[in-house]
Image (cartoon, rainbow, N blue to C red):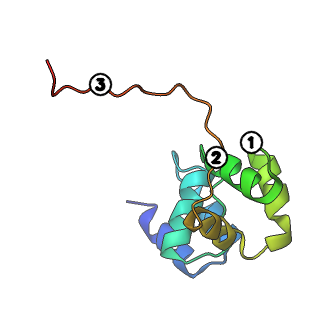
Amino acid sequence: MRLAPRLEEACAMAGPEAAARLTMVPGIGPWTAAETLQRSNGDPDAVSVGDLHLPNTVGWALAGRVRSSDEEMLELLAPYAGHRHRVCRLIRLLGVRAPRFGPRLAPNDHRRR
């Protein structure tokens, strides 16, 4: 495979350069690159842009916003530059969740017939 040696070089690169290297591979976007760098390089600043729930969770925890976009999330995390992933992890570990508005499931008791 032509890309494998070039991808292994990303292990020794700084966050933005490593993310750029990973996103050169077709099918790897910013979310996948951030998730990979968080685990492989221990990047404390790699934010998972494009995550379904993370912007709402961060928006709720830091600004009391029920719904937030990726851009709003990055604005809220700007003061924590260099440690943005750590802040997101701490928010999740604290159990903070944005309010939910989906339909509620009425559980059926299948034991009785």
Distance, label 1 to label 3, CA atoms, is 30 Å
Q: Amino acid at mark 3?
A: Asn
**Which residue in the protein does label 2 denote?**
50
User: Quick check: can you spot residue 15?
Assistant: yes
Q: Residue furthest front?
A: 112
Query: In the image, which is nearer the foreground, mark 2 or mark 1?
Result: 1
Q: Amino acid at mark 2?
A: Gly
Secondary structure beneath label 1: loop
Q: Which of the 4 quarters of the picture holds residue 12?
A: bottom right
Q: Which mark is residue 66?
A: 1
Residue occupying image coordinates x 66% and y 52%: 57
Residue occupying image coordinates x 29% and y 25%: 108
Instruction: Tell me if residue 39 comes above or below residue 92 in the rendering.
Output: below
* Residue 20 horizontal side relative to residue 68, left or right: left
For marks 2 and 3, the one nearer the N-term is 2
For marks 2 and 1, the one nearer the N-term is 2
Where is residue 69 drawn, in percent x and y?
Answer: 76, 43
* Residue 110 horizontal side relative to residue 36, left or right: left
Secondary structure beneath label 3: loop
Image quadrant containing the C terminus? top left
Instruction: Tell me if residue 37 comes above or below residue 29 in the rendering.
Output: below
**Which residue in the protein does label 3 denote?**
108
